[in-house]
Protein backbone atom coordinates (compact mmCIF):
# COMPACT_ATOMS: atom_id res chain seq x y z
CA UNK A 1 0.00 0.00 0.00
CA UNK A 2 1.59 3.34 -1.00
CA UNK A 3 1.47 6.13 1.53
CA UNK A 4 -0.89 8.85 0.33
CA UNK A 5 -0.14 12.57 0.56
CA UNK A 6 -3.34 14.15 1.93
CA UNK A 7 -4.42 17.62 0.85
CA UNK A 8 -6.76 18.07 3.80
CA UNK A 9 -7.26 16.65 7.26
CA UNK A 10 -8.81 13.23 7.58
CA UNK A 11 -12.40 12.65 8.62
CA UNK A 12 -13.70 9.69 10.57
CA UNK A 13 -15.21 8.42 7.32
CA UNK A 14 -11.77 8.53 5.69
CA UNK A 15 -10.15 6.54 8.46
CA UNK A 16 -12.99 4.02 8.69
CA UNK A 17 -13.36 3.52 4.92
CA UNK A 18 -13.84 -0.18 4.31
CA UNK A 19 -14.77 -0.94 7.90
CA UNK A 20 -17.27 -3.79 8.19
CA UNK A 21 -19.31 -3.41 11.40
CA UNK A 22 -21.08 -6.77 11.03
CA UNK A 23 -18.11 -8.96 10.10
CA UNK A 24 -16.12 -10.59 12.95
CA UNK A 25 -12.85 -9.46 11.31
CA UNK A 26 -14.38 -6.24 10.01
CA UNK A 27 -12.21 -4.00 12.17
CA UNK A 28 -9.11 -5.09 10.25
CA UNK A 29 -10.69 -4.04 6.94
CA UNK A 30 -10.64 -0.29 7.62
CA UNK A 31 -8.28 1.96 5.67
CA UNK A 32 -6.77 3.19 8.93
CA UNK A 33 -5.89 -0.28 10.19
CA UNK A 34 -4.61 -1.18 6.74
CA UNK A 35 -2.13 1.69 6.90
CA UNK A 36 -1.05 0.48 10.33
CA UNK A 37 -0.43 -3.01 8.98
CA UNK A 38 1.70 -1.56 6.18
CA UNK A 39 3.53 0.58 8.72
CA UNK A 40 4.40 -2.55 10.72
CA UNK A 41 5.54 -4.38 7.59
CA UNK A 42 7.70 -1.40 6.64
CA UNK A 43 9.59 -1.50 9.94
CA UNK A 44 7.31 0.56 12.20
CA UNK A 45 9.35 3.21 14.06
CA UNK A 46 12.52 2.06 12.22
CA UNK A 47 11.64 2.21 8.49
CA UNK A 48 13.44 -0.45 6.47
CA UNK A 49 14.51 1.83 3.63
CA UNK A 50 15.19 5.47 2.91
CA UNK A 51 12.32 5.45 0.41
CA UNK A 52 9.86 4.39 3.14
CA UNK A 53 11.24 6.96 5.56
CA UNK A 54 10.87 9.71 2.96
CA UNK A 55 7.36 8.61 2.02
CA UNK A 56 6.22 8.76 5.64
CA UNK A 57 7.93 12.12 6.14
CA UNK A 58 6.24 13.44 3.00
CA UNK A 59 2.87 12.32 4.31
CA UNK A 60 3.48 14.04 7.65
CA UNK A 61 4.56 17.25 5.92
CA UNK A 62 1.35 17.22 3.89
CA UNK A 63 -0.83 16.61 6.95
CA UNK A 64 0.93 19.49 8.74
CA UNK A 65 0.18 21.74 5.78
CA UNK A 66 -3.44 20.60 5.83
CA UNK A 67 -3.59 21.42 9.54
CA UNK A 68 -2.23 24.91 8.85
CA UNK A 69 -5.03 25.53 6.33
CA UNK A 70 -7.60 24.16 8.78
CA UNK A 71 -6.42 26.56 11.47
CA UNK A 72 -6.24 29.42 8.97
CA UNK A 73 -9.92 28.99 8.12
CA UNK A 74 -10.94 29.09 11.79
CA UNK A 75 -8.22 30.82 13.85
CA UNK A 76 -9.52 28.87 16.87
CA UNK A 77 -8.93 29.15 20.57
CA UNK A 78 -7.46 25.67 20.93
CA UNK A 79 -7.62 23.92 24.29
CA UNK A 80 -5.76 20.64 24.64
CA UNK A 81 -7.17 17.82 26.73
CA UNK A 82 -4.54 15.19 27.44
CA UNK A 83 -4.90 11.98 29.40
CA UNK A 84 -4.34 8.26 29.45
CA UNK A 85 -5.69 5.64 27.07
CA UNK A 86 -6.56 3.39 30.04
CA UNK A 87 -9.40 5.60 31.34
CA UNK A 88 -12.39 3.30 31.08
CA UNK A 89 -15.61 4.34 29.38
CA UNK A 90 -17.46 3.47 32.55
CA UNK A 91 -15.24 5.55 34.86
CA UNK A 92 -16.42 8.75 36.52
CA UNK A 93 -13.31 10.42 35.16
CA UNK A 94 -14.41 9.60 31.58
CA UNK A 95 -17.74 11.34 32.11
CA UNK A 96 -16.03 14.28 33.84
CA UNK A 97 -13.75 14.83 30.83
CA UNK A 98 -16.64 14.48 28.38
CA UNK A 99 -18.75 17.07 30.21
CA UNK A 100 -15.83 19.48 30.50
CA UNK A 101 -15.08 19.17 26.77
CA UNK A 102 -18.76 19.69 26.00
CA UNK A 103 -18.88 22.86 28.09
CA UNK A 104 -15.64 24.31 26.68
CA UNK A 105 -16.83 23.64 23.13
CA UNK A 106 -20.07 25.46 23.93
CA UNK A 107 -17.95 28.39 25.12
CA UNK A 108 -16.24 28.64 21.73
CA UNK A 109 -13.03 26.68 22.31
CA UNK A 110 -11.83 24.02 19.91
CA UNK A 111 -10.80 20.88 21.75
CA UNK A 112 -7.65 19.10 20.57
CA UNK A 113 -6.65 15.69 21.87
CA UNK A 114 -4.76 12.62 20.79
CA UNK A 115 -7.57 10.93 18.90
CA UNK A 116 -7.14 7.66 20.78
CA UNK A 117 -9.13 5.86 23.47
CA UNK A 118 -9.60 6.67 27.16
CA UNK A 119 -9.47 10.31 28.21
CA UNK A 120 -8.78 11.30 24.61
CA UNK A 121 -11.98 9.67 23.41
CA UNK A 122 -13.91 11.30 26.25
CA UNK A 123 -12.66 14.73 25.13
CA UNK A 124 -13.75 14.22 21.53
CA UNK A 125 -17.01 12.60 22.59
CA UNK A 126 -17.89 15.57 24.78
CA UNK A 127 -17.09 18.04 22.01
CA UNK A 128 -19.21 16.05 19.53
CA UNK A 129 -22.19 16.34 21.91
CA UNK A 130 -21.69 20.08 22.53
CA UNK A 131 -25.24 20.90 21.41
CA UNK A 132 -26.89 18.02 23.24
CA UNK A 133 -28.32 18.16 26.74
CA UNK A 134 -26.62 16.26 29.55
CA UNK A 135 -29.33 13.60 29.53
CA UNK A 136 -28.43 12.79 25.92
CA UNK A 137 -24.75 12.64 26.80
CA UNK A 138 -25.58 10.16 29.55
CA UNK A 139 -27.57 8.03 27.10
CA UNK A 140 -24.54 7.93 24.82
CA UNK A 141 -22.32 7.01 27.74
CA UNK A 142 -24.64 4.12 28.54
CA UNK A 143 -24.24 2.86 24.98
CA UNK A 144 -20.47 3.14 25.24
CA UNK A 145 -20.67 1.08 28.42
CA UNK A 146 -21.63 -1.90 26.25
CA UNK A 147 -17.95 -2.17 25.40
CA UNK A 148 -16.05 -0.30 28.09
CA UNK A 149 -12.60 -1.87 28.06
CA UNK A 150 -10.02 -1.09 25.41
CA UNK A 151 -9.29 -4.26 23.37
CA UNK A 152 -5.68 -5.41 23.48
CA UNK A 153 -4.33 -5.54 19.92
CA UNK A 154 -0.64 -5.54 20.83
CA UNK A 155 0.94 -8.36 18.86
CA UNK A 156 -2.14 -8.92 16.70
CA UNK A 157 -0.11 -8.07 13.59
CA UNK A 158 2.93 -10.08 12.55
CA UNK A 159 6.15 -8.40 11.45
CA UNK A 160 5.15 -8.80 7.80
CA UNK A 161 1.84 -6.97 8.38
CA UNK A 162 -0.38 -10.04 8.30
CA UNK A 163 -2.95 -10.76 10.98
CA UNK A 164 -1.99 -13.27 13.64
CA UNK A 165 -4.59 -16.07 13.33
CA UNK A 166 -5.08 -16.75 17.04
CA UNK A 167 -5.86 -13.05 17.74
CA UNK A 168 -9.21 -13.14 15.94
CA UNK A 169 -11.13 -12.76 19.22
CA UNK A 170 -9.23 -9.58 20.07
CA UNK A 171 -9.93 -8.09 16.65
CA UNK A 172 -13.60 -8.94 17.07
CA UNK A 173 -13.54 -7.20 20.47
CA UNK A 174 -12.09 -4.13 18.74
CA UNK A 175 -15.00 -4.25 16.27
CA UNK A 176 -17.52 -4.33 19.11
CA UNK A 177 -15.66 -1.51 20.84
CA UNK A 178 -15.83 0.60 17.69
CA UNK A 179 -19.45 -0.30 17.03
CA UNK A 180 -20.43 0.97 20.49
CA UNK A 181 -18.75 4.27 19.68
CA UNK A 182 -20.54 4.55 16.34
CA UNK A 183 -23.88 3.74 17.97
CA UNK A 184 -23.28 6.32 20.69
CA UNK A 185 -22.16 8.94 18.14
CA UNK A 186 -25.44 8.57 16.27
CA UNK A 187 -27.38 9.79 19.33
CA UNK A 188 -26.04 13.33 18.94
CA UNK A 189 -28.39 16.02 17.59
CA UNK A 190 -27.97 17.15 13.96
CA UNK A 191 -25.66 20.00 15.01
CA UNK A 192 -22.45 18.52 16.37
CA UNK A 193 -19.36 20.15 17.81
CA UNK A 194 -15.95 20.23 16.19
CA UNK A 195 -12.75 18.89 17.68
CA UNK A 196 -9.30 18.08 16.36
CA UNK A 197 -7.79 14.63 16.85
CA UNK A 198 -4.04 14.19 16.47
CA UNK A 199 -3.33 10.43 16.58
CA UNK A 200 -0.30 8.47 15.36
CA UNK A 201 0.24 5.14 13.63
CA UNK A 202 3.03 4.49 16.13
CA UNK A 203 0.18 3.54 18.47
CA UNK A 204 -1.92 2.03 15.71
CA UNK A 205 -2.96 -0.85 17.94
CA UNK A 206 -5.09 1.72 19.79
CA UNK A 207 -8.17 2.37 17.63
CA UNK A 208 -8.61 5.96 16.47
CA UNK A 209 -11.93 7.05 17.95
CA UNK A 210 -14.75 8.25 15.64
CA UNK A 211 -15.85 11.32 17.61
CA UNK A 212 -13.51 14.04 16.31
CA UNK A 213 -14.61 16.12 13.34
CA UNK A 214 -11.07 16.39 11.95
CA UNK A 215 -7.93 14.28 12.26
CA UNK A 216 -4.27 15.11 11.70
CA UNK A 217 -2.79 11.61 11.85
CA UNK A 218 0.98 11.24 11.76
CA UNK A 219 3.58 8.52 11.38
CA UNK A 220 6.14 10.35 13.53
CA UNK A 221 4.96 10.51 17.14
CA UNK A 222 7.50 13.22 17.97
CA UNK A 223 5.88 15.54 15.40
CA UNK A 224 2.46 14.55 16.64
CA UNK A 225 3.37 15.39 20.27
CA UNK A 226 4.84 18.74 19.24
CA UNK A 227 1.70 19.47 17.24
CA UNK A 228 -0.53 18.73 20.22
CA UNK A 229 1.42 20.89 22.66
CA UNK A 230 2.31 23.86 20.46
CA UNK A 231 -1.19 24.28 19.04
CA UNK A 232 -2.93 24.14 22.43
CA UNK A 233 -2.34 27.86 22.85
CA UNK A 234 -5.40 28.61 24.98
CA UNK A 235 -4.43 26.08 27.66
CA UNK A 236 -4.08 22.38 28.36
CA UNK A 237 -6.19 20.23 30.65
CA UNK A 238 -4.56 17.08 32.03
CA UNK A 239 -6.91 14.25 32.88
CA UNK A 240 -5.41 11.28 34.70
CA UNK A 241 -2.75 9.44 32.71
CA UNK A 242 0.70 7.93 33.01
CA UNK A 243 3.77 7.75 30.78
CA UNK A 244 2.50 9.58 27.71
CA UNK A 245 0.64 12.20 29.72
CA UNK A 246 3.70 12.85 31.89
CA UNK A 247 5.72 13.44 28.74
CA UNK A 248 3.16 16.03 27.61
CA UNK A 249 3.09 17.71 31.02
CA UNK A 250 6.83 18.24 31.05
CA UNK A 251 6.99 19.27 27.40
CA UNK A 252 4.36 21.87 28.26
CA UNK A 253 6.26 22.82 31.41
CA UNK A 254 9.44 23.33 29.39
CA UNK A 255 7.58 25.67 27.04
CA UNK A 256 6.21 27.66 29.97
CA UNK A 257 9.56 27.66 31.78
CA UNK A 258 11.11 29.80 29.06
CA UNK A 259 8.28 32.23 28.29
CA UNK A 260 9.19 35.90 28.46
CA UNK A 261 6.51 36.90 30.97
CA UNK A 262 3.46 35.66 32.87
CA UNK A 263 1.09 36.85 30.14
CA UNK A 264 2.67 34.34 27.73
CA UNK A 265 2.40 31.46 30.23
CA UNK A 266 -0.16 28.99 28.86
CA UNK A 267 -2.58 27.67 31.53
CA UNK A 268 -1.97 24.15 32.85
CA UNK A 269 -5.08 22.56 34.39
CA UNK A 270 -4.74 19.28 36.32
CA UNK A 271 -8.17 17.73 36.24
CA UNK A 272 -9.20 14.79 38.41
CA UNK A 273 -11.93 14.60 41.05
CA UNK A 274 -9.92 12.16 43.18
CA UNK A 275 -6.75 14.24 43.36
CA UNK A 276 -4.73 11.90 41.14
CA UNK A 277 -2.11 14.58 40.40
CA UNK A 278 -1.72 15.57 44.06
CA UNK A 279 -0.79 12.25 45.65
CA UNK A 280 1.69 9.43 45.25
CA UNK A 281 0.47 5.99 44.26
CA UNK A 282 -0.05 3.44 47.03
CA UNK A 283 0.93 -0.23 46.80
CA UNK A 284 0.24 -3.44 48.69
CA UNK A 285 2.92 -5.78 50.02
CA UNK A 286 3.17 -7.54 46.65
CA UNK A 287 3.75 -4.26 44.85
CA UNK A 288 0.28 -4.06 43.29
CA UNK A 289 -1.18 -0.57 42.96
CA UNK A 290 -4.01 -0.10 45.44
CA UNK A 291 -4.53 3.59 44.82
CA UNK A 292 -3.14 5.23 41.67
CA UNK A 293 -1.57 8.65 41.67
CA UNK A 294 1.27 10.71 40.23
CA UNK A 295 2.10 13.67 42.45
CA UNK A 296 3.18 16.61 40.30
CA UNK A 297 1.86 19.60 42.24
CA UNK A 298 5.02 20.11 44.30
CA UNK A 299 7.20 19.65 41.24
CA UNK A 300 5.30 22.32 39.29
CA UNK A 301 5.63 24.78 42.16
CA UNK A 302 9.33 24.09 42.62
CA UNK A 303 10.05 24.25 38.89
CA UNK A 304 8.51 27.66 38.35
CA UNK A 305 9.84 29.10 41.59
CA UNK A 306 13.25 27.99 40.35
CA UNK A 307 12.57 29.77 37.07
CA UNK A 308 11.01 32.97 38.41
CA UNK A 309 12.00 33.36 42.04
CA UNK A 310 10.07 36.14 43.74
CA UNK A 311 7.96 36.67 40.59
CA UNK A 312 6.73 33.08 40.46
CA UNK A 313 3.24 33.70 41.87
CA UNK A 314 2.02 35.38 38.66
CA UNK A 315 2.99 32.24 36.75
CA UNK A 316 1.73 29.75 39.33
CA UNK A 317 -1.74 31.32 39.26
CA UNK A 318 -2.09 29.80 35.79
CA UNK A 319 -1.52 26.29 37.15
CA UNK A 320 -4.67 24.85 38.72
CA UNK A 321 -5.57 21.54 40.30
CA UNK A 322 -9.33 21.58 40.01
CA UNK A 323 -12.45 20.06 38.47
CA UNK A 324 -14.46 23.25 38.95
CA UNK A 325 -15.68 24.15 35.45
CA UNK A 326 -16.20 27.80 36.37
CA UNK A 327 -12.66 28.11 37.71
CA UNK A 328 -11.26 26.44 34.60
CA UNK A 329 -13.31 28.73 32.35
CA UNK A 330 -12.06 31.81 34.18
CA UNK A 331 -8.40 30.79 33.85
CA UNK A 332 -8.78 30.01 30.15
CA UNK A 333 -10.77 33.18 29.48
CA UNK A 334 -8.08 35.32 31.08
CA UNK A 335 -5.56 33.91 28.60
CA UNK A 336 -7.86 33.70 25.57
CA UNK A 337 -6.89 37.04 24.02
CA UNK A 338 -3.19 36.15 24.08
CA UNK A 339 -3.96 32.70 22.67
CA UNK A 340 -6.06 34.12 19.84
CA UNK A 341 -3.39 36.70 19.00
CA UNK A 342 -0.72 34.00 18.85
CA UNK A 343 -2.88 31.78 16.64
CA UNK A 344 -3.54 34.73 14.34
CA UNK A 345 0.22 35.24 13.94
CA UNK A 346 0.63 31.57 13.10
CA UNK A 347 -2.02 31.43 10.39
CA UNK A 348 -0.88 34.75 8.90
CA UNK A 349 2.63 33.41 8.47
CA UNK A 350 4.20 35.54 11.22
CA UNK A 351 5.48 32.81 13.58
CA UNK A 352 8.23 34.91 15.15
CA UNK A 353 5.56 37.20 16.60
CA UNK A 354 4.16 34.30 18.64
CA UNK A 355 5.06 34.81 22.30
CA UNK A 356 6.39 31.25 22.61
CA UNK A 357 8.10 31.10 19.21
CA UNK A 358 11.63 31.60 20.48
CA UNK A 359 12.35 29.95 23.83
CA UNK A 360 15.62 31.46 24.94
CA UNK A 361 17.58 29.35 27.40
CA UNK A 362 19.53 31.39 29.86
CA UNK A 363 22.86 30.21 31.20
CA UNK A 364 22.33 27.91 34.15
CA UNK A 365 18.77 26.88 33.15
Image (cartoon, grey):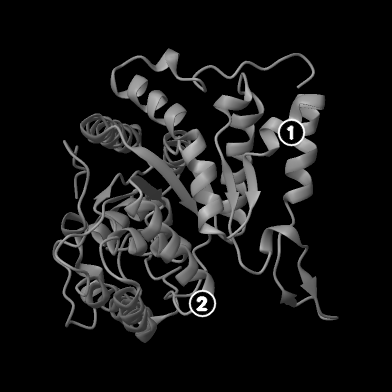
On the image, the x and y values in percent for residue 115 come to 37, 55
Q: Is residue 358 left or right of residue 275?
A: left
Q: Residue at x 49, y 49 (%)?
A: 329
Nearest-to-viewer mark from 2 and 1: 1
State how many labels appear.
Answer: 2
On the image, the x and y values in percent for residue 208 come to 33, 60
Q: Is residue 35 left or right of residue 320?
A: left
Image quadrant occupied by the C terminus:
top right
Labels 2 & 1 near each other (Cβ < 8 A): no
Q: Residue at x 24, y 59 (%)?
A: 34
Residue at label 1?
313
N-terminal of the pair, mark 2 or mark 1, is: 2
Q: Quadrant of residue 248?
A: top right
Residue at label 2?
91
The span from disc 2 to disc 1 (Cα, nearest Å) is 34 Å
Mark 1 secondary-structure assignment:
helix
Q: Between 222 and 356, which is closer to the camera in this rendering?
A: 356
Amino acid sequence: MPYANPTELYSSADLLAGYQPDAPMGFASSWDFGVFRQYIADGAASPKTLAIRRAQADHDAHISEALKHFLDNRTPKLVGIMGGHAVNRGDDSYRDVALLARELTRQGYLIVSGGGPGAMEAAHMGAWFAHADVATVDKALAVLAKATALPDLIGAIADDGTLVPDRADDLDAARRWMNAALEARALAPPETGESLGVPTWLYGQEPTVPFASHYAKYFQNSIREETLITNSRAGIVYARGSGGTIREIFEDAERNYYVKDAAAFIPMIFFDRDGYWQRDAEFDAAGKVTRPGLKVDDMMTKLFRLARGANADAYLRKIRFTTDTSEISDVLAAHAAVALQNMTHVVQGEPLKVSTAVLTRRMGD
